Image (spheres, rainbow, N blue to C red):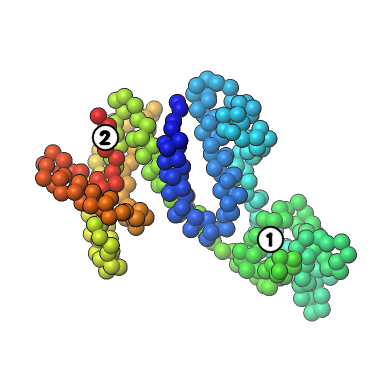
Amino acid sequence: MNKSAREKEAVLDVFAALMRPLMRIAFEYGVSAGDISVAVRRTYIQALEARLLEQKRSTTDERIAVVAGLAKSDVAALREATRAGRPHGVKGTVKHDQIANLLTVWNTNNNFSGAYGLAMDLDLVSTPGSPRRSFKELVAVACPGADEEALLDELVASESVEVVDSITVRCVSRAYLPQETDIKRIAWAGRVLANLADSFAHNLLRRGEEPAYLERAVVSDEPLTEAGRDKFLALAGERGQELLTELDAFTTRLAGAERSETGKRYGFGVYFFEDQHTATPKEQTGTHEVKRNRLTSPLEEIDVLAGLGHQKRT
């Protein structure tokens, strides 16, 4: 179905709005723009492939490339990476014993350590005529076949190694203290964000008799102090937890009568947020007027919290 340029631009604005707060996470965990580009293209290709299968159409690299507007070689490479279990193109996994062995060799092997057992500085990249060994040579001796870049990234992250002037690799500590990340928390964030985006997509694209999923939000009319924020947060946490506890008990009872092996799981989430939208004075006035009008009508009273909500199509 053909869409107008304005509609497409609006959709791209949505993608940008979704991505903008995630950049904080990307910066924190060293995710580059190239990494994100690969992830977006991979996701697009996987979704397109699933769509073509539903339509019983060909899913060759050629067809996907044409529909997606990508080079056939890019599509083939991304699909192969997914089949190989490395969908994001992330460097190989590093084992603790590889790191330990590399540091031991670096600090004890005469080819890589000098007087008093001090680890020598190494060239980041093998350089013809350089009197120094390279990090690649160290990897080849200490743990043959290991992913050189992944090892270096892990050593830098653990602060066992530093890269000086982008040309020299220096061992600053023989100890290896890995920096643990909260993988489960990151995975949970992905699950919540995916569910939220899917709910909005469902409401935007639903057809026929499909039910509209609940969308409600309340935003303070005026900017608040941190003390005001904390009061709002405390009440939202208390009332939100009460509601979730009630719904949890209800779904437990509901499963006894409505459980289905072929059904789907459904949920309801509550979250506190800092509003990222900067409303114009006109928009702010309009929001207040909507709230006042809704308060005057008992039939629409529940929508008093729908400042950001999606209205069901009629």
Tell me what residue is drawn at x 61 percent, y 49 percent.
Answer: 34
| Of the two numbered discs 2 and 1 in the rendering, the one whose residue sits closer to the viewer | 2
Q: Residue 312 carries which label?
A: 2
Q: Where does the N terminus fall, quadrant-wise?
A: top left
Tell me what residue is drawn at x 73 percent, y 53 percent.
Answer: 146
Three-letter amino acid code of the residue under disc 2: Lys
Q: Residue furthest bottom?
A: 116
SS at mark 2? Answer: loop
Q: Which mark is residue 177?
A: none
Indicate the position of residue 251 as horizontal and vertical percent values: 28, 40
Q: Can residue 184 be seen in this view?
A: no
Q: Can residue 214 be seen in this view?
A: yes
User: Considering only vertical position in the picture, is 246 above or below 27?
Assistant: above
Q: Which mark is residue 152?
A: 1
Indicate the position of residue 18 as horizontal and vertical percent values: 44, 48
* 270 sits to left or right of 139: left
Three-letter amino acid code of the residue under disc 1: Leu
Between 197 and 65, the one lying in front of the other is: 65
Q: What separation in Å lies between label 2 and label 1 (alpha carbons)? A: 53 Å
Image-quadrant location for residue 278: bottom left
Tell me what residue is drawn at x 61 percent, y 26 percent.
Answer: 63
Number of dots carrying numbers? 2
User: Considering only vertical position in the picture, is 39 above or below 21?
Assistant: above
User: Considering only vertical position in the picture, is 34 above or below 70?
Assistant: below
Between 80 and 4, the one lying in front of the other is: 4
